Image (tube, rainbow, N blue to C red):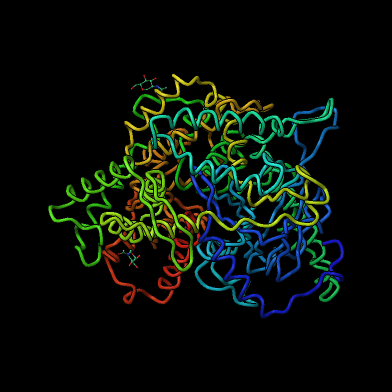
């Protein structure tokens, strides 16, 4: 912060409210995310420069710099804005820069402490997810998993048996969140909100006989204007939209790692000076030695989920000698992602989604009618059949819902049903109970719970700020980073994978049919990822050409659920083949990324990997400690040790915070 003295301190008692309103906001998210829906922070009416009520922090208070300068921010975090070139290959030294928004949850020991393990960079997925928000929401959980089990004790730097404690660092990638310059596809939040409501009313692909025409024309209007805006640049200048794809983001991570080491070295020199002045000159200069910046040779610690695995695999391909640790959870097949390699050969990424739906029917049948409101006599097959009948009924006829004390009248459509089902496939442990209730109600013609869910997801439109009204439409004052996530997704995805947009309406029809053949449950939904790139104009200056392979300095750890709706286990296996020594660790559960369900076995394997580098045995299968609808299958929480119970509670908290919030 430039001027900490003038920042008004808010009363501490507001903190409770902030935490609550953040949680509520997370419960009301709305956008269409693909591999992963990041945490959504709703902006209060009229404050399009979000001021964090606890610390009074705004990103504008930090002057961007080419070295890392951390400033206290939020509550117990540090923030920095790091300048990086838009175009790393530009040789004239000119050109525009990005100021990357970076948030650090400091390690539980100082960086000068021998137990300091370094910074673990994280990414929540998307593409388009904000690493800054991820660290704010989940940073403490991720740190607790990676850190040594016991708290660091003061004065026992040397006899803690090699225990390590890590920083957790999240950054907003190019075109995401608080990284600047940003871009917007809408002049202000009103027009954005209206667009979203209309999109929803038009319905998803498959919702009506003319759904392809409606969605095609809508996407054409959006991509045409949106890609023009992201390509706008002065003569001779770099255009934002040519530099927001994944390879430069991988390069940015390298820059963060180097700059963090530079900062660490400064801290080390200062700490050594103090020590020497207190205790006399230390011949070994031990602090200086262990904090030294190994310029050009610093290595990455990384933990990415979903699309974050694309960033990780890209980094590992481009800079294999710079990988110290990388956990890739919910693995995207990067060949498929970048090059469409394998699509149409029965390798589409939604092949396992319907199996998760069948698990829903199976679990519902197992627990019976009292616990599963959508129970039908006749076994899982009867439950599945009842669902398809319901879907067909809603396709033929929407369901009007009477207003309630808290919401207006509503109409429940086939699209609404597909959305809640799709979310449940991503997050079974968390959402199957709600799905069972909603389906149970719909079966008797009651749409009230689904109406409640639908309206929560609309979010509350915020008023335009005075600043936005004064500066006018399209001005930076009208841009709300937190509301632009799906356009960030589009900008990154469509530029990474140029092939996606290269398809005509007839070709797309085939693609759509192929995907619905591979998954009846999420095929329509997933087809939108490709549709949203039709007509996208921006081309990457630096695209990823090669196969995602590399001999990394340290082997990667791939992690996958047995059944993942959009990043199947087979993708993890295929990716692992390209990285010698890497291991696939499997969690016996359903959902998107292993944090969809708690597993002490997985968490401990990840901890060991970060602590010592040791990988689990190849093809290790970990049980999940909770099953959707069924609860604890193996052992009850009461029989856990105190330490395991603590870790279990953290994992459970993460189930609620990460991935999907409903
Ligand atoms: C519909 O379901 C809700 C529970 O979510 C219940 O409160 C309401 O009474 C039901 N309406 C009818 C008409 O049964
Ligand atoms: C659809 O799948 C078939 C193979 O089943 C494949 O030949 C074709 O290329 C696919 N079409 C598209 C557009 O993906």
Q: Is residue 583 left or right of residue 146?
A: left
Residue at 37%, 31% (x, y): give it.
Answer: 515
Q: Position of residue 108 (x, y in %)?
A: 63, 69
Asked whether 71 or 20 is in front, the reply is 20
User: Toward which corner of the image does residue 450 lie, by quadrant?
Assistant: bottom left
Location of the C terminus by quadrant is bottom left
Q: Is residue 563 left or right of residue 9?
A: left
Residue at 47%, 21% (x, y): give it.
Answer: 505
Q: Is residue 656 left or right of residue 319?
A: left
Is residue 271 visible in the rendered image? The answer is yes
Residue at 36%, 52% (x, y): give it.
Answer: 587
Q: Position of residue 160 (x, y in %)?
A: 56, 71
Q: Residue furthest left?
A: 378
User: Toward which corner of the image does residue 119 lie, by quadrant?
Assistant: bottom right
Q: Position of residue 11 (x, y in %)?
A: 72, 79
Is residue 258 visible in the rendered image? The answer is no
């Amino acid at each position: 912060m430039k001027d900490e003295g003038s920042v008004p301190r808010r009363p501490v008692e507001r903190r409770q409210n902030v935490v609550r309103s953040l949680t509520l906001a997370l419960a009301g998210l709305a956008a269409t995310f693909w591999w992963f829906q990041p945490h959504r922070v709703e902006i209060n009416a009229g404050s399009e420069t979000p001021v964090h009520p606890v610390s009074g922090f705004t990103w504008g208070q930090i002057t961007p710099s080419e070295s890392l300068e951390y400033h206290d921010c939020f509550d117990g975090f540090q923030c920095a804005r790091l300048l990086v070139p838009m175009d790393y290959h530009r040789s004239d030294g000119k050109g525009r820069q990005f100021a990357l928004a970076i948030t650090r949850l400091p390690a539980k020991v100082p960086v000068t402490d021998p137990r300091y393990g370094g910074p673990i960079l994280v990414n929540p997925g998307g593409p388009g997810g904000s690493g800054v928000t991820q660290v704010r929401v989940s940073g403490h959980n991720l740190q607790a998993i990676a850190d040594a089990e016991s708290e660091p004790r003061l004065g026992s730097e040397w006899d803690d048996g090699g225990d390590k404690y890590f920083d957790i660092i999240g950054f907003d990638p190019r075109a995401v969140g608080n990284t600047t310059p940003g871009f917007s596809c809408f002049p202000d939040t009103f027009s954005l909100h209206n667009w979203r409501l209309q999109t929803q009313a038009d319905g998803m692909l498959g919702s009506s006989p003319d759904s392809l025409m409606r969605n095609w024309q809508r996407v054409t209007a959006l991509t045409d204007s949106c890609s023009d805006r992201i390509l706008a640049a002065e003569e001779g200048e770099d255009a934002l939209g040519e530099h927001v794809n994944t390879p430069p983001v991988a390069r940015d991570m390298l820059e963060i790692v180097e700059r963090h080491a530079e900062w660490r070295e400064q801290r080390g020199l200062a700490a050594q000076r103090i020590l020497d002045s207190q205790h006399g000159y230390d011949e070994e200069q031990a602090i200086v030695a262990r904090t030294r910046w190994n310029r050009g040779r610093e290595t990455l610690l990384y933990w990415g989920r979903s699309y974050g695995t694309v960033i990780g695999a890209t980094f590992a391909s481009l800079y294999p000698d710079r990988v110290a640790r990388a956990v890739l959870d919910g693995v995207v097949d990067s060949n498929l992602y970048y090059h469409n390699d394998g699509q149409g050969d029965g390798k589409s990424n939604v092949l396992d989604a319907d199996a998760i739906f069948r698990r829903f029917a199976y679990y519902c049948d197992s627990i019976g009618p009292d616990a599963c409101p959508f129970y039908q006599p006749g076994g899982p097959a009867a439950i599945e059949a009842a669902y398809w009948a319901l879907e067909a009924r809603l396709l033929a006829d929407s369901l009007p819902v009477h207003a309630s004390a808290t919401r207006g009248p509503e109409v429940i459509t086939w699209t609404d049903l597909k959305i809640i089902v799709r979310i449940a496939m991503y997050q079974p442990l968390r959402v199957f109970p709600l799905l069972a209730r909603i389906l149970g109600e719909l079966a008797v013609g009651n749409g009230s719970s689904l109406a409640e869910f639908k309206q929560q997801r609309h979010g509350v439109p915020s008023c335009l700020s005075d600043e936005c009204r004064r500066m006018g439409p399209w001005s930076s004052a009208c841009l709300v980073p937190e509301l632009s996530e799906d356009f960030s997704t589009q900008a990154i995805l469509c530029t990474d994978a140029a092939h996606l947009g290269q398809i005509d309406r007839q070709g797309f029809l085939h693609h759509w049919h192929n995907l619905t053949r591979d998954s009846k449950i999420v095929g329509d939904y997933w087809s939108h990822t490709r549709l949203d790139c039709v007509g996208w104009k921006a081309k990457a200056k630096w695209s990823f050409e090669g196969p995602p392979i590399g001999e990394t300095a340290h082997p990667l750890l791939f992690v996958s659920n047995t059944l993942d709706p959009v990043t199947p286990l087979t993708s993890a296996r295929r990716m692992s083949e390209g990285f010698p020594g890497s291991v696939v660790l499997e969690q016996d559960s359903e959902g998107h990324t292993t944090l969809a369900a708690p597993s002490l076995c997985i968490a401990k394997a990840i901890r060991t990997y970060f602590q010592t580098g040791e990988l689990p045995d190849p093809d290790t299968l970990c049980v999940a400690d909770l099953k959707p609808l069924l609860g604890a299958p193996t052992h009850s929480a009461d029989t856990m040790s105190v330490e395991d119970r603590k870790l279990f509670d953290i994992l459970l908290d993460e189930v609620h915070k990460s991935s999907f919030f409903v």
